[in-house]
Image (tube, rainbow, N blue to C red):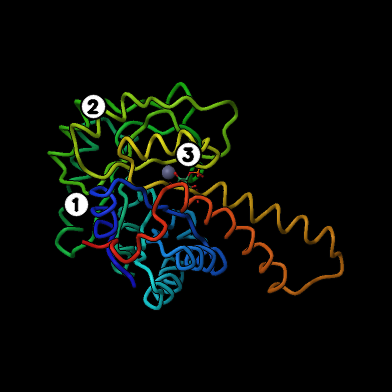
Amino acid sequence: MLVSGIDILAKANIDGYAVGAFNTSNLEITQAIIESAEELNSPAIIQVSEGAFNYAGGKNIAAIVKTMAMDASVPIALHLDHGRDFGILMKAIRFGFTSIMFDGSKYPLQENVERTRRIVDIARSVGISVEAELGKIGGTEDNISVSEQEAMYTDPDEAVEFAKETGVDYLAIAIGTAHGPYKGVPHLDFERLKEIKSRLGMPIVLHGASGLPEEDIKKAVKLGVNKINIDTDIRQAFAAAIRQFLDENKEEYDPRKILGVAKKAMKDVIKKKIIMFGSDNKAKEALI
Ligand code: G3H
Ligand code: 13P
Ligand code: ZN
Protein backbone atom coordinates (compact mmCIF):
# COMPACT_ATOMS: atom_id res chain seq x y z
CA MET A 1 0.00 0.00 0.00
CA LEU A 2 1.06 3.57 -0.64
CA VAL A 3 1.34 5.56 2.60
CA SER A 4 2.76 8.85 3.81
CA GLY A 5 6.31 9.04 5.13
CA ILE A 6 5.36 10.03 8.66
CA ASP A 7 2.94 7.10 8.92
CA ILE A 8 5.91 4.76 8.53
CA LEU A 9 8.44 6.76 10.53
CA ALA A 10 6.28 7.62 13.56
CA LYS A 11 5.95 3.92 14.34
CA ALA A 12 9.65 3.27 13.70
CA ASN A 13 10.41 6.07 16.16
CA ILE A 14 8.20 4.60 18.86
CA ASP A 15 9.49 1.04 18.41
CA GLY A 16 13.17 1.92 17.87
CA TYR A 17 13.99 0.66 14.39
CA ALA A 18 14.93 2.35 11.10
CA VAL A 19 13.33 2.12 7.68
CA GLY A 20 15.47 2.02 4.55
CA ALA A 21 15.02 4.91 2.13
CA PHE A 22 16.33 3.49 -1.11
CA ASN A 23 16.96 5.67 -4.18
CA THR A 24 15.41 4.70 -7.49
CA SER A 25 15.59 6.04 -11.03
CA ASN A 26 13.99 3.23 -13.05
CA LEU A 27 11.66 0.23 -13.13
CA GLU A 28 14.18 -2.45 -12.11
CA ILE A 29 15.49 -0.61 -9.02
CA THR A 30 11.91 0.03 -7.93
CA GLN A 31 11.06 -3.67 -8.41
CA ALA A 32 14.14 -4.67 -6.43
CA ILE A 33 13.13 -2.42 -3.50
CA ILE A 34 9.48 -3.49 -3.40
CA GLU A 35 10.20 -7.21 -3.85
CA SER A 36 12.83 -7.06 -1.07
CA ALA A 37 10.44 -5.28 1.29
CA GLU A 38 7.67 -7.77 0.53
CA GLU A 39 9.92 -10.80 0.95
CA LEU A 40 11.03 -9.53 4.36
CA ASN A 41 7.63 -8.17 5.36
CA SER A 42 9.09 -4.71 5.88
CA PRO A 43 7.92 -1.14 5.26
CA ALA A 44 10.12 0.83 2.84
CA ILE A 45 10.64 4.34 1.53
CA ILE A 46 11.40 4.73 -2.16
CA GLN A 47 13.09 8.00 -2.93
CA VAL A 48 13.81 9.98 -6.07
CA SER A 49 16.53 12.63 -6.22
CA GLU A 50 16.13 15.73 -8.40
CA GLY A 51 18.62 14.15 -10.80
CA ALA A 52 16.54 10.97 -11.01
CA PHE A 53 13.34 13.02 -11.31
CA ASN A 54 14.78 14.78 -14.35
CA TYR A 55 16.30 11.58 -15.78
CA ALA A 56 13.17 9.42 -15.68
CA GLY A 57 10.56 12.19 -15.85
CA GLY A 58 8.99 12.97 -12.49
CA LYS A 59 5.53 11.94 -13.61
CA ASN A 60 6.81 8.65 -15.06
CA ILE A 61 8.83 7.55 -12.06
CA ALA A 62 6.02 8.59 -9.70
CA ALA A 63 3.56 6.51 -11.76
CA ILE A 64 5.84 3.46 -11.65
CA VAL A 65 6.40 3.67 -7.89
CA LYS A 66 2.79 4.52 -7.00
CA THR A 67 1.31 1.77 -9.16
CA MET A 68 3.61 -0.85 -7.68
CA ALA A 69 3.26 0.50 -4.13
CA MET A 70 -0.55 0.39 -4.29
CA ASP A 71 -0.38 -3.31 -5.13
CA ALA A 72 2.36 -4.08 -2.61
CA SER A 73 1.57 -6.11 0.48
CA VAL A 74 3.72 -3.81 2.66
CA PRO A 75 3.57 -0.03 3.38
CA ILE A 76 5.60 2.01 0.87
CA ALA A 77 6.15 5.81 0.87
CA LEU A 78 7.27 7.77 -2.20
CA HIS A 79 9.74 10.48 -1.19
CA LEU A 80 11.50 13.33 -3.01
CA ASP A 81 15.16 13.24 -1.96
CA HIS A 82 17.11 16.52 -1.56
CA GLY A 83 14.46 18.75 -3.12
CA ARG A 84 16.00 22.14 -3.69
CA ASP A 85 14.13 23.48 -6.67
CA PHE A 86 10.72 24.97 -5.80
CA GLY A 87 9.25 23.79 -9.13
CA ILE A 88 10.35 20.19 -8.59
CA LEU A 89 9.03 20.23 -5.02
CA MET A 90 5.62 21.41 -6.25
CA LYS A 91 5.60 18.94 -9.13
CA ALA A 92 6.42 16.12 -6.71
CA ILE A 93 3.33 17.04 -4.69
CA ARG A 94 1.24 17.17 -7.88
CA PHE A 95 2.54 13.81 -9.08
CA GLY A 96 1.53 12.11 -5.83
CA PHE A 97 4.72 11.86 -3.78
CA THR A 98 3.69 11.16 -0.18
CA SER A 99 6.77 12.74 1.40
CA ILE A 100 9.23 15.42 0.31
CA MET A 101 12.61 16.58 1.50
CA PHE A 102 13.39 20.26 1.31
CA ASP A 103 17.16 20.62 1.41
CA GLY A 104 17.96 24.19 2.39
CA SER A 105 21.31 23.24 3.91
CA LYS A 106 23.24 25.53 1.57
CA TYR A 107 21.47 28.60 2.99
CA PRO A 108 22.36 30.51 6.16
CA LEU A 109 20.37 29.22 9.15
CA GLN A 110 17.60 31.83 9.16
CA GLU A 111 17.03 31.49 5.44
CA ASN A 112 16.94 27.70 5.73
CA VAL A 113 14.30 28.10 8.49
CA GLU A 114 12.16 30.45 6.41
CA ARG A 115 12.35 28.43 3.20
CA THR A 116 11.70 25.15 5.03
CA ARG A 117 8.69 26.63 6.86
CA ARG A 118 7.19 27.76 3.57
CA ILE A 119 7.47 24.23 2.15
CA VAL A 120 6.08 22.71 5.37
CA ASP A 121 3.04 25.03 5.19
CA ILE A 122 2.30 23.98 1.62
CA ALA A 123 2.91 20.26 2.23
CA ARG A 124 0.87 20.24 5.45
CA SER A 125 -2.13 21.69 3.67
CA VAL A 126 -2.18 18.68 1.34
CA GLY A 127 -1.20 16.04 3.91
CA ILE A 128 2.37 15.36 2.80
CA SER A 129 5.24 14.74 5.21
CA VAL A 130 8.40 16.87 5.12
CA GLU A 131 12.05 16.13 5.81
CA ALA A 132 14.58 18.96 6.11
CA GLU A 133 18.34 19.09 6.54
CA LEU A 134 20.31 21.02 9.12
CA GLY A 135 24.10 21.06 8.92
CA LYS A 136 25.91 20.00 5.77
CA ILE A 137 26.46 16.39 4.75
CA GLY A 138 29.75 15.75 2.94
CA GLY A 139 30.17 14.23 -0.52
CA THR A 140 28.54 14.84 -3.88
CA GLU A 141 24.93 14.76 -4.90
CA ASP A 142 23.14 16.39 -7.80
CA ASN A 143 26.64 17.43 -8.91
CA ILE A 144 27.01 19.65 -5.83
CA SER A 145 30.15 18.77 -3.93
CA VAL A 146 30.63 19.45 -0.22
CA SER A 147 34.22 18.84 0.83
CA GLU A 148 35.04 17.30 4.21
CA GLN A 149 36.12 20.70 5.48
CA GLU A 150 32.89 22.30 4.31
CA ALA A 151 30.70 19.59 5.83
CA MET A 152 29.26 21.08 8.98
CA TYR A 153 27.96 18.98 11.82
CA THR A 154 24.47 19.78 13.10
CA ASP A 155 24.39 21.95 16.21
CA PRO A 156 21.95 20.52 18.81
CA ASP A 157 20.70 23.95 19.98
CA GLU A 158 20.06 24.98 16.40
CA ALA A 159 18.29 21.67 15.73
CA VAL A 160 15.84 22.29 18.58
CA GLU A 161 15.12 25.81 17.34
CA PHE A 162 14.90 24.67 13.71
CA ALA A 163 12.40 21.90 14.49
CA LYS A 164 10.24 24.24 16.57
CA GLU A 165 10.20 27.03 13.99
CA THR A 166 9.69 24.92 10.87
CA GLY A 167 7.38 22.12 12.06
CA VAL A 168 9.20 19.48 9.97
CA ASP A 169 8.25 15.84 10.45
CA TYR A 170 11.77 14.37 10.34
CA LEU A 171 15.22 15.87 10.33
CA ALA A 172 18.39 14.93 8.44
CA ILE A 173 21.46 15.68 10.51
CA ALA A 174 25.17 15.83 9.75
CA ILE A 175 27.23 13.67 12.13
CA GLY A 176 30.10 12.61 9.86
CA THR A 177 28.48 10.59 7.07
CA ALA A 178 29.08 11.51 3.43
CA HIS A 179 27.31 10.81 0.15
CA GLY A 180 29.02 8.39 -2.22
CA PRO A 181 31.81 5.89 -1.51
CA TYR A 182 33.94 6.55 1.62
CA LYS A 183 37.61 7.26 0.99
CA GLY A 184 38.74 6.57 4.55
CA VAL A 185 37.07 5.07 7.61
CA PRO A 186 34.07 7.20 8.63
CA HIS A 187 33.96 8.41 12.24
CA LEU A 188 30.47 9.24 13.33
CA ASP A 189 29.72 11.65 16.17
CA PHE A 190 27.36 9.42 18.14
CA GLU A 191 27.31 11.77 21.16
CA ARG A 192 25.90 14.49 18.94
CA LEU A 193 23.26 12.12 17.57
CA LYS A 194 22.31 11.07 21.10
CA GLU A 195 21.92 14.65 22.28
CA ILE A 196 19.92 15.76 19.23
CA LYS A 197 17.58 12.77 19.49
CA SER A 198 17.01 13.18 23.21
CA ARG A 199 16.17 16.85 22.80
CA LEU A 200 14.06 16.54 19.62
CA GLY A 201 12.32 13.20 19.97
CA MET A 202 11.32 13.23 16.30
CA PRO A 203 12.47 10.71 13.64
CA ILE A 204 16.08 11.38 12.64
CA VAL A 205 17.41 10.74 9.13
CA LEU A 206 20.88 9.45 8.26
CA HIS A 207 22.12 10.30 4.76
CA GLY A 208 25.14 8.82 3.05
CA ALA A 209 24.72 5.47 4.78
CA SER A 210 26.20 3.32 1.96
CA GLY A 211 29.50 1.78 2.99
CA LEU A 212 29.03 2.35 6.73
CA PRO A 213 30.12 -0.58 8.92
CA GLU A 214 27.25 -2.64 10.35
CA GLU A 215 28.19 -1.70 13.96
CA ASP A 216 27.87 1.99 13.12
CA ILE A 217 24.46 1.48 11.54
CA LYS A 218 23.21 -0.55 14.49
CA LYS A 219 24.52 2.01 16.98
CA ALA A 220 22.90 4.87 15.03
CA VAL A 221 19.56 3.01 15.03
CA LYS A 222 19.85 2.38 18.77
CA LEU A 223 20.47 6.08 19.32
CA GLY A 224 17.40 7.15 17.38
CA VAL A 225 17.92 7.13 13.61
CA ASN A 226 14.67 6.04 11.92
CA LYS A 227 15.25 6.68 8.20
CA ILE A 228 18.46 5.51 6.53
CA ASN A 229 19.29 6.62 2.99
CA ILE A 230 21.02 4.17 0.68
CA ASP A 231 21.90 4.89 -2.93
CA THR A 232 25.56 4.16 -3.72
CA ASP A 233 25.53 0.55 -2.45
CA ILE A 234 22.61 -0.22 -4.81
CA ARG A 235 24.24 1.51 -7.77
CA GLN A 236 27.50 -0.36 -7.17
CA ALA A 237 25.70 -3.73 -6.98
CA PHE A 238 23.82 -2.89 -10.21
CA ALA A 239 26.97 -1.92 -12.09
CA ALA A 240 29.15 -4.78 -10.80
CA ALA A 241 26.53 -7.41 -11.68
CA ILE A 242 26.10 -6.10 -15.22
CA ARG A 243 29.86 -5.84 -15.75
CA GLN A 244 30.40 -9.42 -14.65
CA PHE A 245 27.39 -10.80 -16.56
CA LEU A 246 28.36 -9.17 -19.85
CA ASP A 247 31.94 -10.22 -19.36
CA GLU A 248 30.85 -13.83 -18.97
CA ASN A 249 28.09 -13.63 -21.63
CA LYS A 250 29.59 -11.59 -24.41
CA GLU A 251 26.84 -12.50 -26.92
CA GLU A 252 23.91 -11.56 -24.67
CA TYR A 253 21.84 -8.59 -25.77
CA ASP A 254 18.44 -9.05 -24.11
CA PRO A 255 17.92 -6.16 -21.65
CA ARG A 256 15.60 -8.32 -19.55
CA LYS A 257 18.35 -10.87 -18.93
CA ILE A 258 21.00 -8.22 -18.30
CA LEU A 259 18.83 -6.13 -15.97
CA GLY A 260 17.40 -9.26 -14.36
CA VAL A 261 20.87 -10.14 -13.09
CA ALA A 262 21.30 -6.57 -11.83
CA LYS A 263 17.96 -6.74 -10.04
CA LYS A 264 18.96 -9.88 -8.19
CA ALA A 265 22.23 -8.27 -7.06
CA MET A 266 20.38 -5.15 -5.88
CA LYS A 267 17.90 -7.27 -3.94
CA ASP A 268 20.72 -9.02 -2.09
CA VAL A 269 22.04 -5.61 -0.95
CA ILE A 270 18.62 -4.17 -0.06
CA LYS A 271 17.57 -7.22 1.95
CA LYS A 272 20.79 -7.12 3.99
CA LYS A 273 20.11 -3.44 4.79
CA ILE A 274 16.49 -4.07 5.79
CA ILE A 275 17.62 -6.72 8.27
CA MET A 276 20.45 -4.48 9.55
CA PHE A 277 18.00 -1.60 10.10
CA GLY A 278 15.60 -3.86 12.01
CA SER A 279 12.48 -3.18 9.92
CA ASP A 280 11.99 -6.80 8.79
CA ASN A 281 8.67 -8.27 9.93
CA LYS A 282 7.46 -4.80 10.89
CA ALA A 283 5.06 -4.34 7.97
CA LYS A 284 1.91 -5.30 9.82
CA GLU A 285 2.46 -3.02 12.76
CA ALA A 286 4.31 -0.39 10.69
CA LEU A 287 1.47 2.09 10.72
CA ILE A 288 0.06 3.92 13.70
O1 G3H B 1 21.86 12.03 -1.92
C1 G3H B 1 22.21 11.74 -3.02
C2 G3H B 1 21.65 10.67 -3.84
O2 G3H B 1 22.61 9.64 -3.92
C3 G3H B 1 21.24 11.20 -5.19
O3 G3H B 1 22.27 11.22 -6.10
O4 G3H B 1 21.80 13.33 -7.34
O5 G3H B 1 23.22 11.53 -8.34
O6 G3H B 1 20.76 11.21 -8.10
P1 G3H B 1 22.00 11.87 -7.57
P1 13P C 1 24.68 7.18 -0.39
O1 13P C 1 24.68 7.24 -1.87
O2 13P C 1 26.02 7.50 0.19
O3 13P C 1 24.09 5.92 0.11
O4 13P C 1 23.71 8.37 0.12
C1 13P C 1 22.36 8.30 -0.19
C2 13P C 1 21.63 9.50 0.30
O5 13P C 1 21.94 10.10 1.30
C3 13P C 1 20.48 9.93 -0.51
O6 13P C 1 19.91 11.10 0.01
ZN1 ZN D 1 21.32 12.42 0.93
Ligand 1 within 8 Å of the CB at mark 3: no
Q: Which residue is mark 3?
A: 144
Up/down of 72 relative to 99, above or below? below
Ligand 3 within 8 Å of the CB at mark 1: no
Ligand 3 within 8 Å of the CB at mark 2: no
Q: Marks 3/1: CA distance? A: 24 Å
Q: Which residue is mark 2?
A: 156
Amino acid found under the numbered disc labelled 2: Pro
Q: Which residue is mark 1?
A: 120
Q: Please rate how many residues cluster around mark 1, counting C-alpha atoms within 10 Å: few if below 14, some from 14 to 19, many from 20.
A: many
| Residue closest to the far top | 149
State the image coordinates of residue 61 (x, y, percent, origin top left): 46, 68
Residue at position x 38%, y 69% from top? 74
In the drawing, does residue 174 fall left or right of residue 261?
left
State the image coordinates of residue 194 (x, y, percent, origin top left): 28, 29
Q: Please rate how many residues cluster around mark 3, counting C-alpha atoms within 10 Å: few if below 14, some from 14 to 19, many from 20.
A: few
Depth check: give the residue in front, 125 or 218. Answer: 218
In which of the image's four quarters is ligand 3 placed?
top left
Q: Marks 2/3: CA distance? A: 25 Å
Depth check: give the residue in front, 87 or 229. Answer: 229
State the image coordinates of residue 89 (x, y, percent, origin top left): 31, 57
Element on which disc 1 rests: helix
Element on which disc 3 rests: strand
Amino acid found under the numbered disc labelled 1: Val
**Mark before the other along the chain sequence, 3 or 1:** 1
In the drawing, does residue 89 fall left or right of residue 219?
left
**Front label number (3 vs 1):** 1
